[in-house]
Every structure is written in C-alpha cells, then in structure tokens.
Amino acid sequence: MRSALLSFGLLAIIATAASAQPATSWPDTYLGRVEALAVMEGLNARLLASRSATATLEGWCGDHGMAEPPRLAATLLREVEKPASEETRRRLQAGPDRPLKYRRVRLACGGHVLSEADNWYVPERLTPEMNRQLETTDTPFGRAVQALGTTRQTIGAELLWQPLPLGWEQAPPPGSVCGDLAIPDRLFSHRAVLFTAERVPFSEVVETYGSAILDFHRAERPSDPACGPAPPSRP
C-alpha cells in the first residue's frame, strides 16, 4: 500500500511539473518551419477526418504527452453573444423565429489552450440534460451531445499562419534567421455543421486552433551550421 501511495504521489508531482513547464520553442530555421507546417497539417487532417473535435484534441494531447490524464476541459465564456448569420440558420434549417443558442468556450488540455470554439445550436433538438450541461457547466460541446450519434460536415477550413511561403517546395531553401520561431496565437480554423444520427442538423461550430497545439516536448535536432550549436533539449 505504501508503495502504491508513493507511486501515486510521484505521478502527481510529475504531472504538476509538466503542466508548469514553459512553452516549447521551435527554431526559426528552414527545418524548424517545415516541421511546424507538417505538425499543423497532421492535426488538420485528423480533425477533418474525425466525427468529434473533442475526442481528436484529447487524442492529440495524449499522443504528445501534454497532460496526464489527457482530458479536455472547456472554459465557458459567459455574457458573450454573437447572433447567427442567415447562412448559419439556413444550414441548420432554422427559420428566423426558431430560437438558437450561442456558446463560446476555450478548450484546454492540462495548461494548454488548444482551441476556441463559437457554437450556435438548436436547443429543441437536444435533450433537457444536454441543454442543462451546455448552459450551466463547462462540459465540452462534443462530450455533452455525443449520445446523439453525432456526425460532422466541414464546410470551411482556413490556414491562418503559413510557416513557409507558397511554392516553398519548388524554391531554394531560405536562409535561417535563427533564434526562436515567432508563432502567432491562431494557426488555422474550421467551420462545421453537426448532425444527429438521423441526419438532422443541430449545431454549427467555428473552431480556431492556437499555438498551444505545438507546445509539446521535441527531441533534440541537429543544429543549423549557420546558427551555431543546438540548445540542449528540455528534460
């Protein structure tokens, strides 16, 4: 029993230390930019092929050792309103007299805020318990409505940051700037419509994925000769 308690305490200490570590830096080199682009495109592809962004982000968090347990938590931003557009109502088959609810959350795994989501949904197409969770708790939307057998249809995807210029694969590699790569807060976004198992639309969501998706431990890479020796990797 004592051994189990010590092991549990050690795991808790490790988890706390991991969440307190500073953000991972990416080198401002050609290789660093290629790697950052590849990682972004990898997550983008997983999200586009997924039925649930919540489940995909939890898998990403777990696969990259960003938190233990890799559980996604939502922070509900209250007293925020954003009326649905006519296009959103059309896609949700909700006329101007049908009530829609709006919800904005930040989704984090451990100390990493991976995305922000704007969500418009038709409350009468959800159960009372689902509506209660969405209105009064920080439960991620995908987890709250998963009993509906949700599927999603992506209707828009936008790359908000391009680590390399268009046509980079056919151009000579640019010179290294060195130092840390300046990564903006917002990397890419998706707009999707969610459907019940009976193919009834009930929600439209805009998800904006942030720089924290790149905040994981990376193995040490060879240094760029133009930048001097590589810094030691983080333990």
Image (cartoon, grey):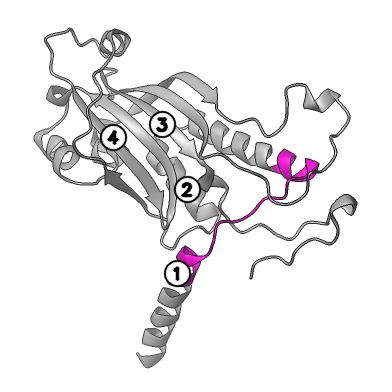
Quadrant including the N terminus: bottom left
Secondary structure beneath label 1: helix
- Dot in front, 4 or 2: 4
Q: Which of marks 3 and 4 is nearer the N terminus?
A: 4
Left or right of 232 on screen, residue 101: left
Q: What residue type is labelled 1?
A: Ala
Q: How far apart are marks 1 and 4 (CA)?
A: 28 Å
Answer above or below: position of 230 versus 180: below
Q: Residues within 10 Å of mark 2 (few under 14, many from 20)?
A: some
Q: Residues within 10 Å of mark 3 (few under 14, many from 20)?
A: many
The residue labelled by disc 4 is: 104
Secondary structure beneath label 4: strand
Q: Earlier in the sequence, mark 1 or mark 2?
A: 1
Quadrant including the C terminus: bottom right
The residue labelled by disc 1 is: 15
Q: How far apart are marks 1 and 2 (CA)?
A: 17 Å
Secondary structure beneath label 2: helix
Callout 1–callout 4 Cβ contact below 8 Å: no
Left or right of 54 on screen, residue 78: left
Q: Which of 29 and 196 is in front in this view?
A: 29
The residue labelled by disc 3 is: 207
Residue positioned most to the bottom: 2
Q: Write down the region rendered in magenta.
A: 15-35
Q: Nearer the viewer, residue 183 or 196?
A: 183
Q: Which of 126 and 100 is in front in this view?
A: 100
The image position of residue 58, as x and y in percent, is 43, 48
Left or right of 24 on screen, residue 92: left
Q: Which amino acid does label 2 sit on?
A: Gly
Q: Earlier in the sequence, mark 1 or mark 4?
A: 1
Q: Which amino acid does label 4 sit on?
A: Arg
